[in-house]
Image (cartoon, rainbow, N blue to C red):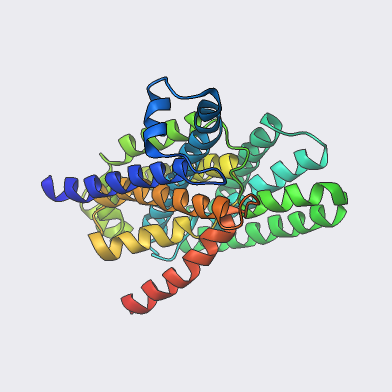
């Protein structure tokens, strides 16, 4: 147990430090002492508004989104038994994007966009799973191929919607597609889903360790393979749907973070899954801080930062593992 707690404690400290950094830095720097004063109910009205209404909700939303994507990526890699698997490859983000962009084209915002994105992601989940299952059982390769085809279909719909969209609505639609935390003001649902998922998957860690070696070995060791695979797929889909609903389409977090942690910590899912929640959240908090401060007062889409950080990092990890 101490072997598991030390890396998690280190990642927790790193996550807290990243959150303090995110709340402190921006177009208007805020000293740490002022942050502590505001959290204790003190400080000026301007500081309370800046921290409690703007930066802290955005920081918590970034942490929750990054954790959701990283855990979803780790679960998909166990399910497909492929360290390069990613939840977005199954078309979940495409379905969410189509739902959200539809609401934007209709001139609706806020709760309508979030609800439509969530519904689109769940529709994509049911569509991929139904097509991959067909008249018999599905296999990881069949599920992966079905997801790639469905994702291509969603991509075609997105391109059509962007081509038909009015010029004044294109910037907002493009920012959402690239990942945008500017309007993330309610982090509680995403944080709650992340916490409940971690509490649920940790007891499944031993079974997931066996499943990662293959379904035949898992069945021989007494694991109920098909119910476990269904559970993993539904959980990964739900995590991805909530993440996309919160911050739009953000890539590479679910791919790079689990791969990086496995190289450092090994392949014990009891450690990897909670570590992914902490490391993924920390990564996205730091990426969002860069997105807010690099060209302040203008902001970059956080998906651009994760791509710029993720591509070279993943290539380095890939060359190192080889």
Residue 264 drawn at (x, y percent): 26, 63
**Foreground of the two, 237 or 113:** 113
Q: Is residue 206 visible?
A: no
Question: Which residue of the protein is positioned furthest toward the left in this rendering?
Answer: 2
Q: Residue at x 29, y 50 (%)?
A: 208
Judged left or right of residue 270, residue 123 is: right
Judged left or right of residue 317, residue 271 is: left
Q: Residue at x 65, y 42 (%)?
A: 120
**Foreground of the two, 284 or 16:** 16
Judged left or right of residue 22, residue 96 is: right
**Total numbered badges shown on the rendered structure:** 0
Q: Quadrant of residue 197?
A: top left
Q: Is residue 176 above or below residue 308?
A: above
Q: Residue at x 43, y 69 (%)?
A: 314
Question: Which residue of the protein is positioned furthest toward the top in this rendering?
Answer: 41
Residue 116 drawn at (x, y percent): 68, 36
Residue 200 drawn at (x, y percent): 33, 36
Q: Residue at x 37, y 30 (%)?
A: 36
Q: Quadrant of residue 213?
A: bottom left
Q: Is residue 251 visible?
A: yes
Where the C terminus falls, by quadrant?
Answer: bottom left
């Amino acid at each position: 147990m101490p072997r598991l707690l030390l890396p998690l404690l280190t990642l927790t400290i790193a996550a807290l430090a990243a959150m303090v950094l995110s709340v402190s830095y921006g177009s208007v720097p805020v000293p740490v002492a002022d942050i502590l004063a505001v959290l204790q109910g003190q400080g000026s009205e301007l500081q309370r508004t800046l921290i409690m209404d703007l930066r802290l909700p955005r920081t918590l939303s970034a942490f929750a989104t990054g954790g959701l994507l990283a855990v979803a990526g780790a679960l998909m890699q166990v399910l497909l038994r492929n360290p390069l698997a990613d939840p977005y490859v199954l078309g979940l983000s495409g379905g969410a994007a189509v739902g959200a962009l539809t609401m934007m084209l209709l001139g609706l915002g806020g709760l309508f966009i979030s609800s439509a994105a969530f519904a689109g992601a769940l529709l994509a989940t049911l569509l991929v799973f139904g097509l991959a299952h067909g008249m018999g059982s599905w296999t990881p390769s069949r599920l992966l191929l079905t997801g790639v085809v469905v994702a291509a279909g969603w991509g075609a719909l997105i391109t059509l919607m962007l081509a038909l969209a009015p010029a004044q609505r294109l910037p907002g639609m493009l920012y959402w597609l690239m990942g945008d935390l500017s309007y993330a003001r309610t982090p509680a649902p995403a944080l709650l889903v992340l916490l409940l998922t971690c509490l649920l998957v940790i007891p499944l860690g031993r079974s997931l360790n066996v499943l990662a070696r293959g379904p035949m070995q898992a069945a021989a060791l007494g694991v109920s393979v098909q119910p476990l695979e269904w559970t993993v797929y539904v959980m990964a889909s739900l995590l991805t749907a909530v993440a996309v609903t919160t911050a739009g389409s953000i890539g590479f977090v679910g791919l790079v973070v689990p791969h990086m942690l496995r190289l450092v910590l090994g392949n014990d899912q009891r450690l990897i899954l909670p570590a992914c929640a902490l490391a993924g959240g920390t990564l996205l908090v730091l990426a969002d801080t860069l997105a807010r401060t690099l060209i302040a007062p203008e902001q970059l889409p956080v998906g651009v930062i994760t791509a710029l950080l993720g591509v070279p990092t993943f290539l380095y990890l890939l060359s190192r593992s080889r």
